[in-house]
Image (cartoon, rainbow, N blue to C red):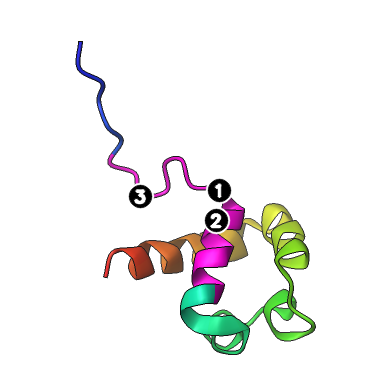
Amino acid sequence: MEKKRSDDPLHGVTLEMILNKLVEHYGWDHLGTKINIKCFNDKPSIKSSLTFLRKTPWARKKVEEMYVFVVGK
């Protein structure tokens, strides 16, 4: 039996993996201008960003959309 692969670009990707990729691609400064949230602009860290994004669906959605755009290039 053949396993079906998911078409979802976020399948199997953790929020931490997404953040690391975006920080690697843009850097904190540029990421903070693209998505203006405090955890990206004021003493940014993966830990504080994960905490905020897990509690804030609208911000997480923006980060996930940006990740899909970056990996789709």
Q: Report x, y in % for residue 62.
A: 51, 66
Asked if the stretch drawn in magenta spans residue 44, the answer is no
Disc 3: CA contacts within 10 A as few (<14), some (14-19) or many (>=20): few
Asked if the stretch drawn in magenta spans residue 17, the answer is yes
- Asked if residue 54 lies left or right of residue 11, the reply is right
- Asked if residue 41 lies left or right of residue 3, the reply is right
The C terminus - image quarter:
bottom left
Which amino acid, by three-letter code, is at mark 1? Answer: Thr
SS of the residue under disc 2: helix
Q: Report x, y in % for residue 8.
A: 34, 44
Q: Which residue is mark 1?
A: 14
Q: Residue at x 73, y 54 (%)?
A: 55
Q: Report x, y in % for residue 48.
A: 78, 66
The residue stretch that appears in magenta: 7-23
Label whose residue precedes the other's in the sequence (3 or 1): 3
| Number of the label disc, if any, that sits on residue 9 | 3
SS of the residue under disc 3: loop
Q: Which residue is mark 2?
A: 17
Q: Residue at x 76, y 58 (%)?
A: 51
Q: Residue at x 79, y 82 (%)?
A: 43
Structural distance between the alpha carbons of marks 2 and 1: 5 Å
Which amino acid, by three-letter code, is at mark 2? Answer: Met
The quadrant holding residue 16 is bottom right
* Residue contact at pointers 3 and 1, CB within 8 angstroms: no
Label whose residue precedes the other's in the sequence (3 or 2): 3
Structural distance between the alpha carbons of marks 3 and 2: 13 Å
